Image (cartoon, rainbow, N blue to C red):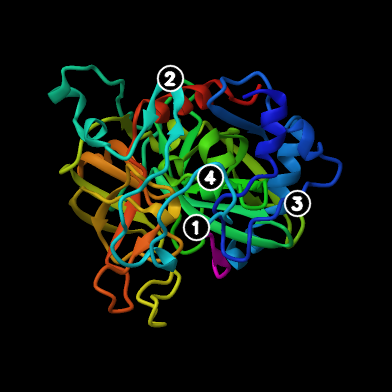
Amino acid sequence: MSPRARRFATTLGALVASGVLAMSAFAGGASADNTYNTTVPGSITSITLTKTSADMKRIAEYWSPARIKQAQDGTPATPEIKPSGGATTATPAPSGGTGTPATATATTAAASGESKTANATSYYSSSSSSGSTAPVVRPTLPKKPSSATAKSPVTVGKVFFRLGDRDFWCSASSVASKSRSLVATAGHCAYDAKQGRHADYWIFIPGYDKGETPYGVYVGHSLNLHESFVGLGDYDYDYAFVNVHDGFIWKPGKSPNTYEMEPVGKLEDNVGGQGLVVKRGIGQAALAFGYPAAPQIDGSRPYDGQKLRWCSGRTTRRPAPTYLMELGIALKCGFTGGASGGPWLVDYNSATGLGYLNGVNSFAWDVDTDRKYDLISSPYFITSTYNVYRWADSQHAS
């Protein structure tokens, strides 16, 4: 992306948290103008959150044990729709992502020369059936022994971030990488393209359970997204890969009611990392994980966001013109807000809690109009997804 286009991307809209994602620059930190890495490939937007160890420490100290527990009752981030007037057009579906969408007409550029069109049949052909070879990242076990008794994936946890004068949260997962420090989540859990601003004070807590941080807290160093999400609000690219600092846990300090940071090392060493596959086609048996908390459309609250939940099924094609999504996939699931960013895993091994990341929770549907969500959508992972992942892996803290 050219510098001029990159500046444009900071003012164009996309889809955001409820209450609107608004950037809050930490005191003494860099301005939004120089947080953007201008040397990245043209299809990727990379945003540096921490430039110094002091930045990292300031964010860590903001998320005190008391604030983390308080934030668990805060507002989960949910997707919103970019205002009209962008460069793409689509036939809108009913608001809130409900109902059956019409055929999308938008066409946008993707990474590596890919382009998506209304006829997306070729995209849904798996790499094996088409004779092509798609990149595969294999999952990794943690280097440190786990104290977990349940076989739920401890790679999955919550992300918390500062949005304006409020705290929000989403779901996310550790993903295997050379840096051993990479988190996958939804794009709208990292960037508000509607406001043209990125999330700040971003942390990840794997294995989150009722406010506990058994595997540490990991401060985000760089947010990495596809430019079509940042600039166009295109939910075919509603994913983000965040490189994080080494983790820490809060230990009681020497004085009463004080805490000290105790280092715990790299994320992947502590919880392992999910693998990554792209272009697997539809009809895949998948499990979706997350921390849903928001109410259903009818006001009922089946979830409280304190425990990891999951859904399972086979993926189906599900475009959503309102969200400019032509290549979307869906699972039968009643997840609500808070699950955003949680992983979709294929070839999942319940004994290890590991599989292959093949999507992330993006937005929900009420297909049968009973005022309860019954489907959850994800972007369909293609080569563009892998390219953002690979770039993000290189953006580790020095």
As measured in the structure, the alpha-carbon distance from the residue carrying label 4 to the one carrying label 3 is: 24 Å
Q: Of the residues tagged 4 and 3, which is closer to the observer?
A: 3
Q: Is residue 73 visible?
A: yes
Residue 373 percent location from the top left of the image = 32, 69
Q: Is residue 143 visible?
A: no
As measured in the structure, the alpha-carbon distance from the residue carrying label 1 to the one carrying label 4 is: 28 Å
Residue at figure coordinates x 15%, y 44% from the top left: 283
Q: Of the residues tagged 1 and 4, which is closer to the observer?
A: 1
Q: Amino acid at mark 4?
A: Gly
Residue sitting at the far left: 129
As measured in the structure, the alpha-carbon distance from the residue carrying label 4 to the one carrying label 2 is: 36 Å
**Which residue has dot 1 on it?**
79
**Which residue has dot 3 on it?**
24
Q: Of the residues tagged 1 and 3, which is closer to the observer?
A: 1
**Which residue has dot 4 on it?**
216
As measured in the structure, the alpha-carbon distance from the residue carrying label 1 to the one carrying label 2 is: 27 Å
Residue 250 percent location from the top left of the image = 62, 50
Q: Amino acid at mark 3?
A: Ser
**Which residue has dot 2 on it?**
112
Residue 166, quarter of picture: bottom right
Of pointers 4 and 3, the one earlier in the residue sequence: 3
